[in-house]
Image (cartoon, grey):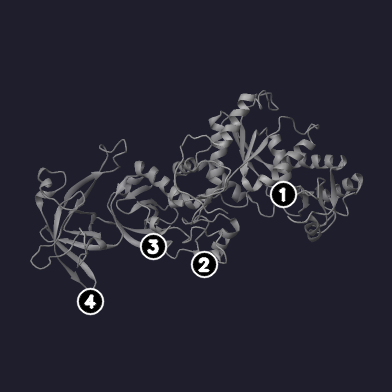
Amino acid sequence: MNKKIKNSSVSLESNNFIKNIIKKDIIKKTFNNRYDKYGNKLPQVITRFAPEPNGYLHIGHAKSIFINFELAYKYNGLCNLRFDDTNPLKENKEYVNSIIKTIKWLNFNWDKVKKRIYYASDYFDILYKIAEYLIISGDAYVDSQNTEEIYINRGNLHEPGRNSPFYNRLPSESLNLFRRMRSGEFKDGAHVLRVKINMKSKNINMRDPIIYRIRHVNHYRTNNNWCIYPMYDYAHPISDAIENITHSICTLEFQDHRPFYEWILNKIDKTNFIKRPFPKQYEFSRLNLTHTITSKRKLLKLLEKKIVDGWDDPRMPTLIGMRRRGYTPESIKLFCKRIGVSKSDSWINIEILEQALRDDLDIKAPRIMAVLNPIKLIISNFLDNQEIECTAPLFSRQHTQYKEKLRYFPISKILWIERDDFMEIPTKKYFRLYPPIGKNSGNRVRLRYGYVVECTGFKKNKNNEVVEVYCKYFPDSKSGTKLSSNYKVKGNIHWISKSHALSIEARLYDRLFIDPYPNIVNNKDFKLLINPNSKKVISAYLEPNLKLIFPKKHAQFERHGYFILDDIDSNNNKIIFNQSVELKNKWKKMM
């Protein structure tokens, strides 16, 4: 795969090849004057998102969801949600519920006219009847080869396939066998139903593809009513046609499947099963995101090896994991707009995704001060019980309520500050706190939204670690007062009153993989590319304004980044925040 990384954004309203196709179809009235079975006129654009309910949706699915729903909205159409539930070995109701919940969280709606949730299993009866029709017409046959024999006779990219020894089986015999397959007479793998196309085709997907196989497995919707199940390539185009889909949009790996999509629809063109105009399949490039894998098989290995804590682990690319991490529906949609739609494979820099979250939360997330690596700062000339109220804006300058919404918190004698805001021996261009050196006084900084202080000394423990920093404050230097401008300082640090600080657990998350391409690194187990610092759990302090971050539960911890309250693990005895994203991208020099 080409490792060209896409770093820049595209125009949010730019055209793409799918939009151009739809525009042409609208001009030509390709899908005009169509009516559903109730006599209601159908729109000229109907798309569908068709996930298999065998796992949790991930960021790659978000791109497909966005494309299908947004195109339908843009052209006054409809978008169906259809579950491709043709493989009962892997599918269950839990995944169905999770997918529905996740799409609703993304604020996409398939109930615009009426409830438009469909299942491939809705069509099992008609799919079976079509299969019988194909047998009778001589276009399908029951193949009794075993799996290995079918695989060998299929050939490969360099060798043509060979006809099955059962290729010329009489339609009457195939029909009889197929009905006996339906009745449960045979074991799994005893027979399959194939269509006759061309075993010498350069496209392996056209070498007499299998359209039915035996599975004596309970289906989560149809129970034990069926023991034969249609293949996706067979069910997909017919389901699209039944639902009057106009533009069947999928990822590039299905490009070689399109000839069969068109073949099967044309084969049943003259029947009463479906009617023209037929849907058309179009493919776009799937999402290849750096530092990320989306393979369900590989994600499952992360769980089995206990590298992550679950499908909703904030480091996972699953949408339930990203939601817990603090990603918003708006940020994911913004990301999808920025990466655009194309037919060429490329790698999308994860920074585009992270920046979309920053851009979304910067405007609406309330601000709050947090100290993640605390050390005591003692203001020696502050009275022991003295408290002075300070104020600060609740939101950024871009927020419509920037000036109106304020937060209040006290300053007192003992504060918590960040440990790296003090240095015993300062480096060059270090503008934060350091003690007197020789005849020079200690450095001055402003306590954010508070007073200017001057460092007067520090205290160490037995391990030679600094445990307390001492300073004095200047009473006429408070932020917002007339005389505060008389103090010119280069350093500005944040702080929290020790007696008012809220104790929290902060989970600092980073990218799960250190390599940009964990999915394709040659000769390396992708699990060996795990970032050892992808999760760090620390005790921290928060200013006493927790109630101000509700109901959204997002906040910008000033200087540190954006965080979200963890609803799952937090309780009355422990407040837990997950880091969503840092304020700036620290990986730029590393990529």
Query: Which residue is located at x 87 percent, y 42 percent?
Result: 138
Q: Residues within 10 Å of mark 3 (few under 14, many from 20)?
A: few
Disc on res. 537: 3
> Residue 357, position in %: x, y?
41, 46
* Residue 406 in view (yes/no): yes
Disc on res. 223: 1
Of all residues shown, which one is farthest toward the front? 158
Asked whether disc 4 touches disc 2, contact meaning CB atoms under 8 Å apart, the reply is: no
The CA span between labels 3 and 1 is: 45 Å
Q: Which residue, given by chain and number where applicable, does mark 2 sit on?
A: 528
Disc on res. 462: 4
Q: Is residue 398 above or below residue 42?
A: below
The answer to which of marks 2 and 1 sits earlier in the sequence is 1
The answer to which of marks 4 and 3 sits earlier in the sequence is 4
The answer to which of marks 4 and 1 sits earlier in the sequence is 1
The CA span between labels 2 and 1 is: 42 Å
